[in-house]
Image: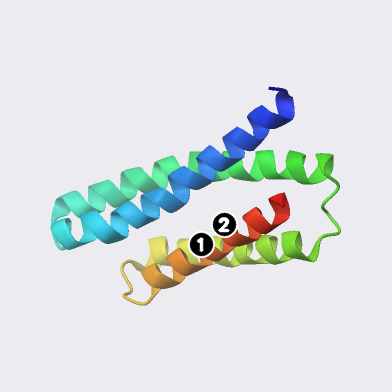
C-alpha cells in the first residue's frame, strides 16, 4: 500500500461518512427526533463532523485529480459543479432552517457526486 492508496482510502472514508451520515439523519433520526431539541443537537454535531469530512474529501480529491491527471475530465468538472451547488444549498439550509424540499435534494446531489466519483475511478 502506497501513499496514493492511503489517500484514496481517506477520500472514500470521508465520502462514506458524509453521505452515510445524511442517510442516517434522514432515515433514522428525523423520523424519531423530529420536533425535539435532540434533533437540533444531532444535526449540529453531524454538521461539525461533516466539515472535517468535507475538508478531507476536498484536499484528497485535489491531490488525486492532480496525480491521476483528471483535471481535463468532464466527469470531474460535473462533480465539482455539483459540489459547489451542494455547498450553496447546505449554507442555505443552515441559514434558513428546515425546508422540506432541501433534504431530498441534498441527498440526491450527494449520491450523484458519489456515482460520478465511481465513474472517475474506472
Q: Residue sitting at 72 percent across and 25 percent down?
A: 3
Give the percent coordinates (x, y) of residue 77: 75, 63
* Residue 76 vs residue 55, the one in the foreground: 76
Q: Alpha-carbon neighbours of circle 2 within 10 Å: few (<14), some, or many (≥20)?
A: some
Give SS at disc 2: helix
Give the label on residue 111, or none. Answer: 1
Give SS at disc 1: helix
Res. 27 image quadrant: bottom left
Instruction: Determine the CA span between mark 2 and mark 1.
Output: 5 Å
Check contact, mark 2 vs mark 1: CB within 8 A. yes
Residue that lies at the very extreme toward the bottom in this rendered image: 101
Q: Residue sitting at 38 percent across and 49 percent down?
A: 21
Residue that lies at the very extreme toward the top in this rendered image: 1
In the image, residue 122 sits, relative to residue 49, either above or below, namely: below
Q: Which residue is mark 2?
A: 114
* Residue 47 vs residue 9, the one in the foreground: 9
Quadrant including the N terminus: top right
Give the percent coordinates (x, y) of residue 87: 55, 60
Q: Residue sitting at 68 percent across and 30 percent down?
A: 5
Q: Alpha-carbon neighbours of circle 1 within 10 Å: few (<14), some, or many (≥20)?
A: few
Give the percent coordinates (x, y) of residue 2: 72, 23
Quick check: 66 left or right of 5?
Answer: right
Give the percent coordinates (x, y) of residue 108: 47, 68
In the image, residue 47 sits, relative to residue 81, either above or below, namely: above
Q: How is the image coloured?
A: rainbow
Amino acid at each position: 500500500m502506497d501513499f496514493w492508496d492511503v489517500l484514496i482510502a481517506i477520500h472514500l472514508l470521508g465520502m462514506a461518512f458524509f453521505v452515510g451520515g445524511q442517510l442516517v439523519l434522514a432515515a433514522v433520526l428525523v423520523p424519531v427526533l423530529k420536533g425535539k431539541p435532540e434533533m437540533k443537537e444531532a444535526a449540529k454535531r453531524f454538521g461539525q463532523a461533516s466539515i472535517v469530512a468535507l475538508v478531507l474529501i476536498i484536499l484528497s480529491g485535489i491531490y488525486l485529480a492532480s496525480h491521476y491527471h483528471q483535471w481535463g475530465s468532464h466527469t470531474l468538472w460535473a462533480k465539482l459543479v455539483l459540489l459547489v451547488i451542494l455547498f450553496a444549498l447546505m449554507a442555505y439550509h443552515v441559514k434558513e432552517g428546515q425546508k422540506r424540499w432541501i433534504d431530498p435534494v441534498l441527498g440526491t446531489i450527494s449520491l450523484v457526486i458519489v456515482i460520478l466519483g465511481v465513474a472517475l475511478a474506472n
